[in-house]
Image (spheres, rainbow, N blue to C red):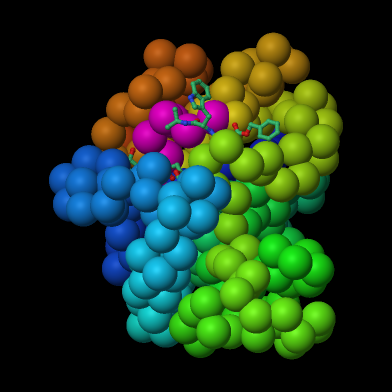
Amino acid sequence: MAPERIVILTGAGLSAESGLGTFRGKGGLWDEYDLEEVATPEGFARNPVKVHDFYNMRRRWLREACPNAAHFALAKLEREHSGEVLIVTQNIDPLHEAAGSKAPIHMHGELASALCAYCCASRPWTEDLSLATDCPACGESGYMRPDVVWFGEMPREMERIYAALAKCDLFVSIGTSGTVYPAAGFVAEAQGAGAHTVELNLDPSEGASLFAEKHYGAATEIVPAFVESLLKP
Ligand code: BV8
């Protein structure tokens, strides 16, 4: 029977073929950078310049990045599936939206947005950030930061995500190593709700054994094929 309610979790592997770096595995960002130094509030407090440089570099990468066949296939599923489709992404890039996805949940925030730690205003941001950047809302200087969720910070829209996992009948995890929580725990939540669980990845993730169905290969190949299998009458 065709699934009615689908929740899809995506990770850095979905954007790998769009030229954006992954975190772990060969050549991953965490090989080059210490996540404690560049992806925690403590690291930002200790050395904001280093953190701004890390995110300014990644924000510049966005200017060259285009959605790939996997992003487009997921947008097609959203348009053509008769039931509900919710995309929850760990990625901070805007490639789901660029491929036509309407409203993915960015549970780890968005690189193309800046947040003022003084007045909490956030707004679209494509340029570099630095300590000299004034907040356009409150005018304070030295408080602007990337609008992302660092380690030790609460991911976004968790209530909405858990509510969707509790009633989904298909959970698909794409391009994630299954190492970062709470996202890595979503498959267990979905399974507990009786959903069919599928992993689409380049190679088995840390949580591979928890999935009922697995397909391994490049996202630009296996995701369009999987979407076609879901949409065929
Ligand atoms: C929180 C945003 C609580 C910024 C990121 C022990 C147990 C449980 C939890 C913890 C623990 N110790 C510490 C924690 C908490 C911690 C955590 O999980 N740590 C890990 C390291 C153990 N989690 C947190 O801190 C989270 N917050 O728990 O808050 C709380 C409660 C109350 C009040 C306050 C707080 C916050 C986590 C979010 C951190 N921010 N990023 C940024 O992007 O710079 S995490 C970062 O990792 C990215 O978001 C990334 O998306 C995410 C996960 O990585 P992946 O997406 O999976 O990427 P990865 O490179 O690992 O894997 C890529 C995969 O793709 C690979 O499997 C590869 O095979 C595949 N692939 C590659 N190429 C392709 C491909 N697949 C297909 N096709 C290809 N071509």
- Classify residue 77 as left or right of residue 224: right
Q: Position of residue 41 (x, y in %)?
A: 54, 49
- Along the viewing direction, whichever of 92 and 7 lies nearer the viewer: 92
- The one nearer the camera, 157 or 68, is 157
* Residue 206 seen in this snapshot: yes
As for residue 27 lying within the magenta part, the answer is no
Q: Is 119 positioned to the left or the right of 174 in the image? A: right
Q: Position of residue 137 (x, y in %)?
A: 80, 83
- Looking at the rendered image, the quarter that the C terminus falls into is top right
Residue at (81% x, 81% y) in the render: 138
Characterize the magenta stretch by its predominant secondary structure.
loop
Residue 143 in picture, x, y percent from top left: 64, 70
Report the number of numbered marks.
0
Could you say which quadrant of the image residue 8 lies in?
top right
Q: Residue drawn at (31%, 59%), measured in percent from left and top?
A: 21
> From the viewer's perspective, is residue 98 above or below residue 224?
below
Q: Is residue 3 left or right of residue 178?
A: right
Q: Nearer the viewer, residue 80 or 161?
A: 161
Of residues 38 and 229, the one nearer the viewer is 38
Read off the magenta span: 175-181
Please indicate, yes or no, whether residue 73 appears anywhere in the rendered image. no
Q: Is residue 180 magenta?
A: yes
Q: Quadrant of the N terminus?
A: top right
- Indicate the position of residue 72 as horizontal and vertical percent values: 52, 66
* Left or right, 193 with reference to 55: right
Q: Is residue 34 above or below residue 208?
A: below
Write the residue at 74% across / 16% down: 193
